[in-house]
Image (cartoon, rainbow, N blue to C red):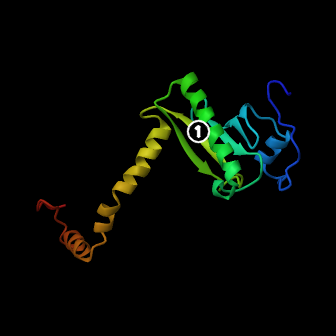
Amino acid sequence: MCYPFRCYWGEPMSDEKPDCVFCRIVSGGEPAQVILENEHALSILDINPLAQGHCLVIPKRHVPWWHQLTAQENASLFTLARATSKRIMKVFAPEFVTMYARGRRIAHTHIFLIPTFKGDPTDRHFNALEGFQEQAATLAGLRDRGVLVLTADLLRKGKGKKGRDS
């Protein structure tokens, strides 16, 4: 055990990537604040948190995308995500815990667990994404040929929708 960091000193992963920070955490080569652990996964504090208690859940095996994990690894990963989320709810009492999975910037699956309160940055971010989803039909309507002709005509005439000069 490494205080204040808990290091995992398990068997070397056959597909461990030495340039992957999460592989180094799993092998004990990089310090991390480990919150929970099971056979196939670790939950750790994010070093760039979006909120106090923001955790990442990572598989012990290097796999870029969660859907590439075995069924057993996936079950382990999401079981640990659920247990970690329950801890976050108990300790920080957020409205809910936002969860999303990545593997793009750091090509090792990681599930974000972010304590989320109404109006905080995470809530606003996802509300904006949902707003884009909901506005798709409106935005698509702006591409309609008739709407484009009308818009061009309004701009050419320099008159506002209510007939005022602009």
Q: Which residue matches tag 1?
A: 113
- In the picture, the quarter occupied by the C terminus is bottom left
- In the picture, the quarter occupied by the N terminus is top right
Across and down, in percent, residue 161 comes to 15, 61
Q: Nearer the viewer, residue 110 or 157?
A: 110
Across and down, in percent, residue 39 comes to 76, 40
Across and down, in percent, residue 84 comes to 62, 33
> Quarter of the image holding residue 67?
bottom right
Up/down of 158 relative to 64, above or below: below
Q: Is residue 52 visible?
A: no
Question: Image check: 6 left or right of 102?
Answer: right
Which residue is located at x 62 percent, y 45 percent? 111
> Quarter of the image holding residue 34?
top right
Q: Nearer the viewer, residue 43 or 120?
A: 43
Element carrying mark 1: strand
Up/down of 84 relative to 65, above or below: above
Q: Nearer the viewer, residue 102 or 124?
A: 102
Tally the marks.
1
Question: Image check: 108 left or right of 86?
Answer: right
Which residue is located at x 76 percent, y 53 percent? 62
Q: Residues within 10 Å of mark 1 (few under 14, many from 20)?
A: many
Q: Is residue 121 visible?
A: yes
Across and down, in percent, residue 86 comes to 57, 30
Question: Image check: 122 left or right of 2?
Answer: left
Which residue is located at x 49 percent, y 38 percent? 121
Which residue is located at x 43 percent, y 51 percent? 129
- Tell me which amino acid carries mark 1: Leu
Up/down of 165 relative to 54, above or below: below
Up/down of 107 relative to 49, above or below: below
Question: Which residue is farthest front?
Answer: 72
